Structure formats: structure tokens, C-alpha cells
């Protein structure tokens, strides 16, 4: 009707006010976090990271919601740690070796200790974290560490049966794996895993150091034809999941406790996933016609003696920084 004006009762006005204020506030009350990871979404380690996000959401009753960014879409692998410190990403997973020299205590985990499984390496990694509480992580809140199974040398065209066969070969490797390659007589080429396939495919490098899982996870089994089972010099690569410290401090103590419980569960899951992926990687490698080269006990011992310089060098270098490198190495050996 023309000229009709609607008048709201005081109760109706109150209800309208509640709708306009309380509901938006409840939405804002959810903590929105971002998680950056360099693994492609199809990789088991990426799928586990996404599952971690969902588990946090579930157990915090969606009071914490996490937006997941795989495949380096939010931060590239080498910049992930700094990205989390700076708040570009709230949570991140990356390889510690991509920040060479930044994590002196944790870098001992990657040494060629003769790792046999991902569960073993992951246990060692978190034992070191718990035992030494490295100051190098003080600008973030570490969720947990995990590490892959034995890192072995793979080659494209050259069958490597001895140290002499390895001399001069260009191998992709980063951090400790590159140091192991150099100690054994090869020429390391420091590039990330994301670049590895094309480098091998184009013949830029003669081979790569990587765990068996990468033969399928990164399809490297399509471009390498020999796997040297150099278990006596097998290294690992340590991965860290960490959170921006300011964001962590804004989480309630109750939810922090819940997240730490989830972390303990998922550290083991990541280790187990590495081992399962190694089995699939080996199967993929052999299906593609790859040849496995085993080592005799005598040859294995020769390789271990050559690689021992990497451990000695680590102890010497970190000792100059006031870190008891031998103590770290001894803890690792005791938990092998």
C-alpha cells in the first residue's frame, strides 16, 4: 500500500542485530591457515600432508581450517622455510637440505649412516629433534620431521660396479647426497628433485641419488636404467613440517595439544609411507626394464670407507660453530 511503513518491534530489532553480528563473528572465529608443500598432489607425501590438514580440522571441530597448496603453488621448495617465517605461508613442508648450512644439528640426520628404511630414518630424525631441541628452528614451531628410506645412486647409461666406474659421472644431488657423491668420486650437480626428470631425460646429468620411491613418485624410473644398492653409504633426506610462530601462539593450548598428538601420529605415517612407496618404486623401476646392481661385502666396505670422510667433515665443521657434532652422530648411531 502506498505510504505504508513497516515498524519493527524491539524484539525484532534485537534478532536482526544478532543475525548481522553473531553469525559473521562465528565465521571470523575460525582460524584460517595456509599450508605450502612442493610435492605434487598425486604424491603420497602430498596426500598425507592434505590428510594432516583434514585431521586438524576434524579434531578442532573446524575451529582451525587449513587451505592446502601443493606443487610449489604458494612457495617454492627452497623458499618455504623463509616463507613460513615471514608469514607468506602459515605452515610448510620442505627439505632441510635446500637451505644448506642453516640447520647444522639436523643436517647430521642426512649423513650416510647406512639407513635401511623410512621408519628408521624418521625415528632417528625426531629423536635428534627431541634430544637436542636445535636452536636453528627457533624462528618457527616445528610440527615434526620425517625422512625417506635409503638414498641410492641411480644412473642413466652407465652400469656402476665399482668406485672406478663412478669417477667423473655427473649426478644430481643436494646437500649431503652431493657430498657423498663427491666423496665417492662422482661430480655432484646441486638441483632440486623437481628438475631431476628433465635433467636425466636430456642427458644433462648421468644419474641421480634418490630413494627407490622416486622412481615412481617422480617417474625417474623412466629415465634411469641402473640402481646401485650402495646400502653401506645410504643417506636420507630430512623433511620438516613447521608453522609460523605467531600463528602457533594464537592457537589455544587445548588445540595446540591436539595438534601435537596428531603430529606424533603423522610422523610415523610419513615414515611408513616412504617404505611402502619404496616397494612401489622398485616395482616401477624393474617394470621399466631397470637393472639392480648389488654390491659384495668387500665393495660395500670400500664405499663406506670413502664416504666416512663426510661424517668426519660434518663433526669438524659444526664443532667450529660450538656444536658437539660427535654427540649428535653418536645419538644417530645408537638409534639405527
Image: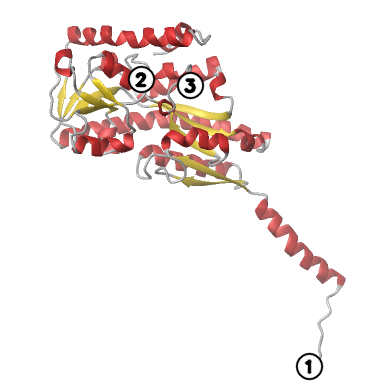
Q: What residue is shown at x 32% (from left), y 21% (from top)?
A: 177
Q: Nearer the viewer, mark 1 or mark 2?
A: 2
Is the residue marked by circle 2 packed among few (<14), some (14-19), or many (20+) residues within 10 Å? many
Location of residue 243 in the rendering, given as x and y in whole percent from the top left corner: 56, 34
Specify whether residue 65 is in view: yes
Mark 3 neighbour class, 10 Å CA radius: few under 14, some 14 to 19, many 20 or more: some
Dot 2 lies on which element? helix
Q: Nearer the viewer, residue 300 or 63?
A: 300
Q: Is residue 67 above or below residue 284?
A: below
- The secondary structure type at the circle numbered 1 is loop
Front of the two marks 1 and 3: 3
Question: Which residue is disc 2 drawn over?
Answer: 176
Q: Are marks 1 and 2 in contact (CB under 8 Å)?
A: no
Q: Which mark is residue 2?
A: 1
Which residue is depicted at the point 18% across and 6% down?
Answer: 298
Q: Residue at x 16, y 36 (%)?
A: 287
Q: Which residue is mark 3?
A: 103
Amino acid at each position: 500500500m502506498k505510504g505504508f511503513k513497516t515498524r519493527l518491534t524491539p524484539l525484532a530489532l534485537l534478532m536482526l542485530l544478532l543475525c548481522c553480528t553473531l553469525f559473521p563473528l562465528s565465521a571470523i572465529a575460525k582460524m584460517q591457515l595456509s599450508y605450502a608443500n612442493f610435492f605434487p598432489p598425486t604424491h603420497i607425501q602430498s596426500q598425507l600432508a592434505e590428510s594432516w590438514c583434514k585431521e586438524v580440522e576434524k579434531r578442532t571441530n573446524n575451529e582451525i581450517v587449513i587451505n592446502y597448496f601443493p606443487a610449489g603453488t604458494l612457495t617454492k621448495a627452497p623458499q618455504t622455510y623463509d616463507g613460513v617465517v615471514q608469514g607468506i605461508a602459515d605452515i610448510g613442508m620442505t627439505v632441510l637440505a635446500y637451505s644448506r648450512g642453516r640447520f647444522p644439528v639436523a643436517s647430521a640426520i642426512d649423513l650416510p649412516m647406512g639407513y635401511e628404511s623410512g621408519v628408521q630414518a624418521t625415528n632417528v630424525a625426531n629423536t635428534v629433534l627431541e634430544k637436542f631441541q636445535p636452536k636453528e628452528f627457533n624462528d618457527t614451531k616445528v610440527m615434526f620431521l620425517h625422512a625417506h628410506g635409503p638414498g641410492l645412486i641411480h644412473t642413466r647409461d652407465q652400469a656402476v660396479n665399482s668406485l672406478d666406474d663412478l669417477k667423473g659421472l655427473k649426478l644430481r644431488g643436494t646437500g649431503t647426497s652431493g657430498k657423498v657423491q663427491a666423496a665417492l668420486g662422482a661430480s655432484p650437480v646441486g638441483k632440486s628433485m623437481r628438475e631431476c626428470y628433465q635433467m636425466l631425460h636430456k642427458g644433462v646429468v648421468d644419474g641421480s641419488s634418490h630413494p627407490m620411491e622416486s622412481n615412481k613418485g617422480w617417474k625417474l624410473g623412466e629415465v634411469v636404467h641402473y640402481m646401485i644398492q650402495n646400502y653401506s653409504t645410504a643417506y636420507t633426506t630430512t623433511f620438516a613440517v613447521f608453522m609460523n610462530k605467531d600463528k602457533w601462539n594464537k592457537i589455544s593450548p587445548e588445540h595446540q595439544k591436539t595438534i601435537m598428538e596428531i603430529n606424533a601420529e603423522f610422523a610415523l605415517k610419513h615414515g611408513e609411507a616412504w617404505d611402502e612407496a619404496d616397494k612401489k618404486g622398485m616395482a616401477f623401476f624393474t617394470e621399466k626394464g631397470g637393472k639392480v646392481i648389488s654390491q659384495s661385502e668387500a665393495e660395500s666396505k670400500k664405499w663406506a670407507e670413502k664416504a666416512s670422510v663426510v661424517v668426519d667433515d660434518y663433526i669438524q665443521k659444526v664443532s667450529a660453530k660450538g656444536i658437539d657434532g660427535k654427540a649428535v652422530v653418536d645419538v644417530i648411531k645408537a638409534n639405527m
